[in-house]
Image (cartoon, grey):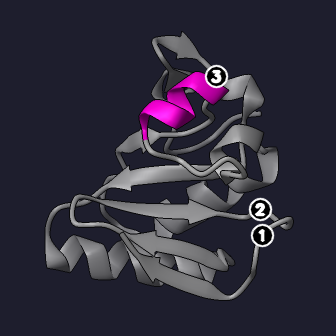
């Protein structure tokens, strides 16, 4: 699968490439969102193994464990608005907003149509 804006090397967990563990639909939606936003998306976190998830403070049912989530680096209000708007238009229904990142996931096992703060 080819993505316009993301390479396989941008997806890692504890130094190990985890691109193949990512939900392909999420990757397609992420590419659409990046196109719409018009700003770079730097992936801070994607698929996580259990140990990495615990170290990151992730919940035991984290969407990251199933390859259904990414955290996108963001530390200014203009980019935050562009990224969040594009994620919603691209179809993401689970968005978390942190001071330096935006979490986006498509995990159907978790509540839908939600935005939360870290």
Q: Nearer the viewer, mark 2 or mark 1?
A: 1
Q: Residues within 10 Å of mark 2 (few under 14, many from 20)?
A: many
Q: Nearer the viewer, mark 2 or mark 3?
A: 2
Inter-mark Cα distance, 3 to 1: 22 Å
Q: Position of residue 86 (x, y in %)?
A: 48, 77
Give the residue displayed 35% in from the left and 67% down from the top: 38
Q: Quadrant of residue 84?
A: bottom left
Magenta-colored span: 50-56
Residue designated by label 3: 18
Give the residue displayed 79% in from the left and 44% down from the top: 24
User: With 108 as the anchor, is 73 left or right in this view?
Assistant: left
Q: Position of residue 75 (x, y in %)?
A: 16, 62
Q: Which residue is more in the foreground, 68 or 56?
A: 56
Please identify the quadrant where the N terminus is shown: top right
6 above or below 94?
above
Q: Position of residue 85 (x, y in %)?
A: 44, 84
Q: Secondary structure at mark 3?
A: loop
Inter-mark Cα distance, 2 to 1: 6 Å
Q: Quadrant of residue 17?
A: top right
- In this view of the protein, can residue 98 be seen by the observer? yes
Inter-mark Cα distance, 2 to 3: 17 Å
Residue designated by label 1: 110
Give the residue displayed 45% in from the left and 51% down from the top: 71
Secondary structure, magenta segment, majority class: helix
The disc placed on residue 107 is 2
């Amino acid at each position: 699968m080819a993505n316009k804006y993301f390479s396989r090397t941008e997806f890692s967990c504890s130094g190990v490439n985890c691109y193949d563990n990512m939900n392909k639909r999420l990757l397609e939606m992420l590419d659409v969102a990046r196109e719409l936003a018009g700003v770079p998306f730097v992936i801070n976190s994607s698929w996580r193994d259990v140990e990495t998830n615990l170290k990151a403070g992730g919940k035991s049912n984290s969407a990251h464990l199933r390859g259904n989530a990414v955290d996108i680096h963001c530390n200014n209000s203009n980019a935050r608005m562009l990224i969040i708007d594009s994620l919603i238009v691209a179809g993401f229904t689970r968005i978390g907003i942190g001071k330096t990142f935006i979490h986006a996931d498509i995990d159907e096992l978790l509540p839908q149509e939600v935005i939360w703060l870290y």
